[in-house]
Image: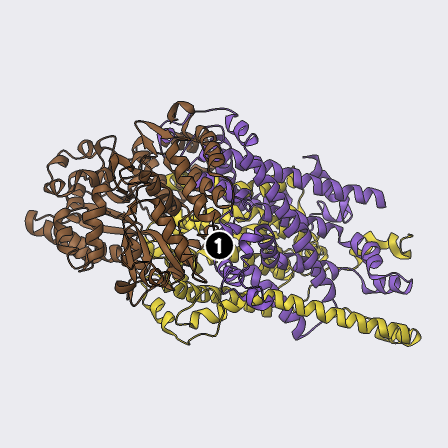
């Protein structure tokens, strides 16, 4: 993973971020600080994850003959997944979902709110932020019911509002529906993160740029972006990974109609839980991990190049 | 799978270390560690799903069984109930996880179609292997052979059927009258079904037929749609060790879907909605659906004037029911004029239980005539026992109709691990027909996919 | 396009402008109003028109955002009080009957308490462990640190998915953590920690070290430094991570469902799914009411945290 080496380069000066051991921890004590978290992570994350990787090499099923005698089948599951239309369908849908709802939706909307609210105080800002955050912290089973009620074909609030009676949004525009839903659900994180980032851009710099005749777009590109690049990376990386692994749309559309919203976590759920094919499901999880890895590397590479180009 | 567990845990020192520190804190769950305690599990919970069953277990079965053991044998036993109230798939997963780890409840309720796959996995064993007295229970004589299949796999009894049901065509008599049809109706073939639907099509705002289709309806598509019709076309989906492929009956069944949805006699969108089945109930209760294929559950719990979730005050006057006709008289399975499908669950003893004899005693206790009547609390509902049915159904003409007319012609699904996946393929096939593909094309592509699911063309007939 | 004149100063500026440490919600940055007023007078006409357009645009946008985010919430405010709720947010026939039914339900109210235990326990564990780890990783360069964080972050996606349920379940069985709330807390914490450490480390990186150095000169131990100096500075970050973990646990269904046995221990996320009938139909009256009850604790927590600490990433995520 050479991409990780790009981290100190891409943002703040390395000297500050690096090992300036101000509190005099020392390596041994630092290891002690890290140990409790690591113990939990090794036991309940690393170990099950490796086990899952192993399961992906078997034909293990939850019931039936293969449950009693699981066989190691090598890469057969991977072979099957890569040749499976449902897998490629699911991959394409997931990429659409991540691109539409996280990269474009949440990040842009979150930034827009943060940018427009940056100099505001008082009730308006508090109300906007509270509503956006509410969508983020309410339990997913609750918000899916809210959206089912909103988008319902017969008595839905949206149809009443737009005067489009009988429009079955979740069936006629399933992908668009879950994208908008996920923007609604997740914009808060980007908003908070960018609000904090914008707080680090000195207002005087923006003023100067404005006086020099720069429009909003130019200000954003030339003054703001170079300063919040690191935040953009962190934000895009986290929201992309979270969205990639988000199972919530299942509660809205159950992957349908006709698998048109069967994004990867839903696909895995159906394979593992509804069909009980845990070996196959585990293999797809590993493939999903590899795709996540590629996404992470692409982000880091992009930001590094931009840094090199502007330097 | 226990092999996996041990080996894997041994590999990880850290996990073992955590284990040592946590053993003290963990409130060791498990079951049957004490000699005289039993755990019952069912997907039922007070205040929620299947509340009646949950309350019966907690308030009737447990105290009465404990008392009986005390009085008859002077033995102290303790019985507890692990309630759940979730999707059946999730409940099944939880049970399977427990059983593969060698634990689990002593008595559990399984859907009849899980028996085969659980047996193949070795999670459950034929009753005679678990309990020596298994064949000598008096109740077996009261459960018809056909119904015993619900708790059996490959001609071995694994559990005692807990209850069964049957599927019929419901119709709205008022709408029939409005469409110029007779209020009393029993179609003799699919033609007459379509004719009635076409007449109903003349009424504004009414969907003539609701025939479940598509994947959003899940198993409801297969059980209250495809399979009873297929049986009416003369075939079981699994017969003589092979799955049906692109047979005439499969194509004809899909053809009926095509007829209904291509001619606007059904509502294609409703089949795709996640809440589609609930909505079909609401619409039927509102008088917006003419004909609906459903189980007796619909009568008892959906349109029931007081207890229903979509209650119809005038249910007894307005809701009619008819047997599902074969494609033509005499063309159904076994040369029948009519067909149906049944489901239900069975209670099974965990082969790993520490007290197999006691567990079986409790199991038979739960399936006694007295216990079943206590469960129903006077409500009419079809049980597995003929003696009980004779008493509890006598005041409900509809359920008597099912017990007398439908159960003798009914069929059950194959309890095999592949069934769930075959069922999904059937759901997908109906979905394709609903969205406009022709029955022939869909039958061909269904057959193709079937090969991948059941392990090759060798397991498929025609 | 030439960069603005002060472009070269960018990297060092972030050094010079330390992270905001105020715990109240951020006020407006100190803008030199006088300068602005003079500037405004100079370009009065054109600027004024542009500003009006900008104002209209601003309020249009804000109204849309408000509508977008509040619209779905309507149902939650209406349906619980409706005697016969459907999926439409219509005028209800007012009733409190639904609350009474839930109050009498043997598991509903208790499940909220269980959720508090699970979410609170996990939140506490995640915040504490992640803060310790993030601080150490921020201040001391351990070998392979960055790579480790990324690998763990990626792996957490496997374990939070469905496919890992057999390993997690069998692990919990072997560790005798079945039917134990502690087991649920530990399993969930394991999945949340990487993201929490990742975000908190960025916070820690962004805090100034000068105080820590002086405290060290006065002989404070690293643990004291952490407790008395670092924690107060990153408190908004800790609060944010705490709220985030609680929200994650609050909505989690699968892990508590698979690991817990006795319904007395079920959290609200599991009990929510019990309000279905035999045939799988949602009981909308109970579900909407329970949704409201289920949401109240997280809303209260959010209001508390946001009034106390300012619910935001103060100054960071920095890198």
Residue at the outermost top position: B458
Residue B180 on image: x %, y %: 35, 60
Nearer to us in this view, B43 or B419: B419
Can you name the residue that lies furthest to the left here? B72
Residue A39 seen anywhere in this rendered image of the structure: no
Q: How is the image coloured?
A: by chain
Shade of chain A as shown in the rendered figure: purple
Closer to us: C146 or C215? C146
- List x then y, in percent, for residue B256: 41, 43
- Say if residue C95 shows up in the picture: yes
Left or right of residue B248, residue A253 in this image: right
In the rendered image, which quarter is residue C307 located in? bottom right
The answer to whether A247 is drawn above or below residue A134 in the figure is above
Crowding around mark 1 (Cα neighbors within 10 Å: few <14, some 14 to 19, many 20+) is many
Return the x and y of residue C264 as percentages of the image width and height.
33, 57
Name the quarter where the C terminus of chain B is drawn.
top left
Q: Residue furthest right?
A: C42
Residue of label 1? C249
| Nearer the observer, A100 or C37 | A100
In-image side of A236 versus B408 (left or right): right
Left or right: C173 as drawn, with respect to C14:
left
Number of numbered discs visible in the structure rendering? 1
Q: Position of residue A283 (x, y in %)?
A: 52, 33
Quarter of the image for the N terminus of chain B: give it: top left
Q: Which one of the lettered chains is coloured brown? A: B
Element under disc 1: helix
Which of the two residues, C224 or C37, is positioned nearer the viewer here? C37
**Which chain does yellow denote in the image?**
C
Label 1 lies in what chain?
Answer: C
Q: Quadrant of residue A79?
A: top right
């Amino acid at each position: 993973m050479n991409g990780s080496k790009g981290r100190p380069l891409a943002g703040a000066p390395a000297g500050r971020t690096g090992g300036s051991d101000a509190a005099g921890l020392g390596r041994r004590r630092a290891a002690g600080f890290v140990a409790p978290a690591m113990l939990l992570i090794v036991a309940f994350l690393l170990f099950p994850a490796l086990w899952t990787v192993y399961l992906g090499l078997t034909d293990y099923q939850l019931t039936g003959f293969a449950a009693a005698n699981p066989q190691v089948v090598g890469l057969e599951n991977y072979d099957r997944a890569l040749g499976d239309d449902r897998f490629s369908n699911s991959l394409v849908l997931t990429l659409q979902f991540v691109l539409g709802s996280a990269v474009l939706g949440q990040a842009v909307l979150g930034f827009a709110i943060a940018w427009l609210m940056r100099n505001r105080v008082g009730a308006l800002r508090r109300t906007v932020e509270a509503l956006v955050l509410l969508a983020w912290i309410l339990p997913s089973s609750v918000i899916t019911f809210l959206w089912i009620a909103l988008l319902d074909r017969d008595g839905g609030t949206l149809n009443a509002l737009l005067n489009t009676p009988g429009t079955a949004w979740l069936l006629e525009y399933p992908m668009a529906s879950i994208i908008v839903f996920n923007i609604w659900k997740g914009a808060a994180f980007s908003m908070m993160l960018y609000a904090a980032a914008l707080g680090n851009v000195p207002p005087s710099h923006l003023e100067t740029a404005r006086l020099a005749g720069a429009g909003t777009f130019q200000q954003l590109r030339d003054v703001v972006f170079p300063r919040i690049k690191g935040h953009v990376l962190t934000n895009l990386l986290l929201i992309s990974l979270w969205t990639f692994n988000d199972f919530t749309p299942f509660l809205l559309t159950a992957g349908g109609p006709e698998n048109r919203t069967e994004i990867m976590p839903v696909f895995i759920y159906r394979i593992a839980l509804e069909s009980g094919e845990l070996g196959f499901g585990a293999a797809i999880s590993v493939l999903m991990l590899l795709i996540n890895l590629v996404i992470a590397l692409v982000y880091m590479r992009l930001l590094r190049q931009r840094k090199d180009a502007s330097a | 799978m226990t092999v996996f567990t041990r080996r894997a845990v041994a590999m990880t020192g850290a996990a073992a270390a955590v284990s040592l520190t946590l053993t003290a804190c963990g409130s060791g769950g498990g079951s049957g560690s004490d000699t005289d305690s039993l755990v019952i599990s069912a997907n039922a919970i007070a205040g929620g799903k299947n509340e009646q069953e949950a309350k019966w277990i907690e308030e009737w079965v447990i105290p009465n069984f404990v008392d009986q053991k005390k009085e008859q044998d002077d033995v102290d036993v303790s019985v507890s109930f692990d309630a759940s109230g979730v999707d059946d798939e999730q409940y099944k997963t939880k049970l399977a996880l427990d059983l593969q780890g060698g634990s689990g409840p002593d008595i559990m309720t399984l859907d009849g179609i899980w028996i085969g796959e659980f047996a193949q996995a070795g999670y459950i064993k034929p009753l005679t292997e678990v309990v020596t007295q298994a064949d000598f229970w008096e109740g077996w004589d009261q459960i018809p052979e056909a119904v015993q299949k619900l708790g059996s796999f490959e001609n071995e009894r694994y559990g005692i059927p807990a209850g069964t049901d049957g599927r019929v065509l419901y119709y709205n008599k008022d709408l029939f009258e409005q469409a110029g049809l007779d209020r009393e109706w029993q179609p003799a073939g699919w033609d007459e079904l379509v004719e009635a639907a076409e007449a109903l099509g003349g009424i504004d705002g009414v969907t003539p037929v609701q025939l479940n289709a598509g994947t959003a309806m899940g198993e409801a598509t297969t059980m209250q749609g495809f399979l009873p019709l297929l049986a009416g076309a003369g075939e079981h989906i699994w017969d003589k060790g092979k799955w049906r492929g692109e047979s005439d009956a499969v194509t004809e069944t899909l053809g009926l879907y095509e007829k209904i949805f291509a001619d606007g006699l059904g509502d294609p969108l409703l089949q795709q909605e996640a809440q589609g089945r609930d909505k079909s109930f609401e619409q039927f209760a509102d008088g917006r659906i003419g004909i609906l294929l459903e189980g007796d559950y619909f009568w008892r719990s959906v349109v029931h004037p007081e207890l229903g979730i979509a209650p119809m005050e005038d249910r007894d006057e307005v809701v009619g029911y008819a047997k599902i006709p074969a494609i033509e008289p005499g063309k159904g399975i076994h040369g029948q004029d009519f067909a149906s499908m049944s489901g239900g669950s069975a209670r099974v003893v965990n082969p790993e239980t520490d007290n197999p004899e006691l567990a079986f005693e409790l199991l038979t206790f739960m399936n006694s005539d007295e216990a079943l009547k206590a469960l129903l609390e006077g409500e009419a509902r079809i049980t597995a026992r003929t003696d009980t049915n004779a008493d509890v159904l006598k005041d409900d003409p509809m359920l008597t109709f099912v017990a007398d007319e439908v159960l003798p012609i009914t069929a059950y699904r194959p309890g095999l691990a592949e069934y769930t996946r075959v069922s999904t393929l059937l759901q997908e096939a109906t979905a394709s027909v609903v969205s406009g593909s022709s029955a022939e094309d869909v039958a061909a592509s269904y057959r193709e996919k079937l090969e991948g699911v059941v392990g090759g063309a060798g397991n498929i007939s025609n | 396009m030439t960069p603005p004149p002060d472009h070269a100063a960018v990297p060092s500026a972030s050094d010079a402008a330390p992270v905001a440490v105020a715990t109240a919600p951020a006020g407006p940055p100190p803008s030199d109003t006088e300068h602005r007023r003079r500037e405004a007078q100079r370009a009065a006409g054109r600027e004024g028109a542009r500003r009006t357009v900008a104002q209209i645009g601003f309020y249009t946008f804000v109204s849309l955002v408000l509508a977008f985010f509040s619209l779905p919430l309507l149902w939650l405010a209406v349906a619980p009080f409706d005697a016969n709720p459907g999926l439409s947010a219509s005028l209800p026939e007012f009733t409190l009957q639904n609350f009474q039914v839930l109050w009498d339900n043997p598991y509903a109210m208790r499940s909220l308490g269980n959720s508090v235990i699970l979410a609170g326990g996990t939140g506490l564990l995640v915040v504490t462990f992640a803060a310790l780890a993030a601080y150490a990783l921020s201040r001391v360069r351990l070998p392979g640190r960055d790579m480790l964080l990324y690998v763990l972050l990626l792996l957490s996606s496997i374990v939070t998915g469905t496919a890992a349920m057999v390993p997690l379940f069998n692990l919990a069985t072997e560790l005798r953590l079945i039917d134990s709330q502690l087991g649920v807390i530990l399993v969930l914490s394991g999945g949340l920690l990487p993201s929490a450490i990742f975000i908190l480390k960025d916070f820690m990186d962004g805090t100034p070290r000068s105080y820590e150095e002086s405290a060290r000169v006065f002989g404070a131990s690293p643990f004291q430094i952490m407790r008395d100096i670092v924690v107060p500075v990153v408190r908004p970050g800790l609060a944010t991570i705490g709220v985030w973990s609680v929200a994650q646990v609050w909505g989690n269904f699968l892990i508590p469902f698979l690991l817990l046995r006795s319904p007395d221990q079920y959290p609200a996320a599991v009990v929510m799914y019990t309000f279905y009938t035999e045939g799988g139909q949602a009981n909308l009256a109970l579900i909407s009411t329970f949704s409201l009850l289920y949401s109240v604790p997280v809303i209260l927590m959010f209001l508390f945290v946001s009034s106390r600490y300012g619910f935001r990433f103060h100054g960071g995520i920095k890198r």
